[in-house]
Image (cartoon, helix red, strand yellow):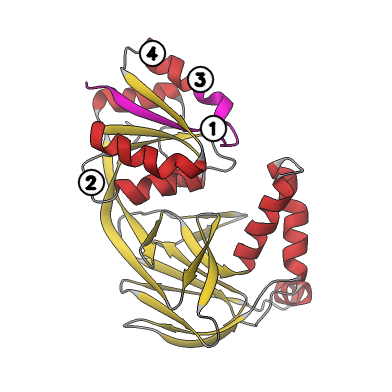
Amino acid sequence: MDAIAVIINKMAKNSANAILYLDGLKSANISYILYETIPKNLPATIKKCIEKHKIILVGGGDGTIRTAAHYCAYTSVILGVIPLGTLNHFAKELDLPSDVKEIVVSLKKFHTIKIDLAAVNDIIFINNSSIGFYPKFADKRDQYTKSYNKWLSYIPGFIKSFKKHPAFTLTVKSKSLDLSLHTSFLMVSNNVYSYQFPATIKRENFQKALLGLYYFKEGKIQLFKIIQSIFYNKNLFEKFQSKHPIEIHFNNEKEIKISVDGDTIKTKTPLHYRTLSRSLTLLKSSS
């Protein structure tokens, strides 16, 4: 096996655990070249590794993996995930090898899978992209992270965003949809989420080339509306799926802040969402 690339985001929540994976690769006699980087330099590092390596292991959270997927899409590179983030939704949903023993077995047996990605205005994402409440929350969370532990920053970030977040008048269009909405929460996902009691939201399949669409039906998210929905069994959220591209047109905004896999990005409107079928090759569990 040629030397693989191991890229570690030094700013990832659990980046200190990277040494466990590096020691495990060394013990298994798997040759690697280590690239330690920070988020600002991550794209350049990934592009350099794509030119030199057939297999790239990337250590970080979902934002780091999203960046790697953006550049590895539609290439022959095999991408492996070292879950060093706070939540690691992507690795958990796909049941990717999570400890070094599993990663070593997958590397030696060469177990891979091709999955779909999605894109908004040509920005690729692995999980979801949203407008309104979540980008506001992500910004507030990141502000508080400078002073608090990332987990603790979720609480004041959520409270601040709940009190004040934008609502948009917009139109959702696709071959099978034409919706006019006033909403403070709209999300598009790479394939479709399902809910499992009591509190699990996940995707069972990453190969159906579908976009999931979810939105809050009644303007701004307010606590009393949520309470009403619980006691009166009123569904405040709507869900659709589409195998066709989705366009979101805004009445007033020419530029908007969106979230992609937890990170916030400014982009021009309208928003053009599409699925990228079987566009990424991943290292998968051997089971």
Q: Position of residue 7 (x, y in %)?
A: 41, 32
Closer to the camera in the image, 179 or 268: 268
**Image quarter for residue 160?**
bottom right
Question: What is the three-letter code of the residue carrying label 1?
Answer: Lys
Tags 3 and 2 touching, CB below 8 Å: no
Q: Position of residue 69 (x, y in %)?
A: 36, 48
As drawn, is 158 to the left or to the right of 205? Answer: right
Give the CA separation, mark 3 to mark 2.
28 Å
Question: What is the three-letter code of the residue carrying label 3?
Answer: Ile
Helix, strand or loop at disc 1? loop
| Nearest-to-viewer mark from 1 and 3 | 1
Tags 4 and 2 touching, CB below 8 Å: no
Residue position marked by numbered label 3 in the rendering:
19
Q: Which residues are magenta?
A: 1-19
* Sequence-wise first label, 4 or 2: 4
- 128 vs 110: above or below: below
* Sequence-wise first label, 2 or 1: 1
- Quadrant position of the N terminus in the picture: top left
Q: Residue at x 72, y 78 (%)?
A: 232
Q: Which mark is residue 45?
A: none
* Sequence-wise first label, 4 or 1: 1
Residue position marked by numbered label 2 in the rendering:
75
- 145 vs 202: above or below: above
Q: Residues within 10 Å of mark 1 (few under 14, many from 20)?
A: some
Q: Which mark is residue 26?
A: 4
As drawn, is 14 to the left or to the right of 159? Answer: left
Q: Which mark is residue 10?
A: 1
Helix, strand or loop at disc 2? loop
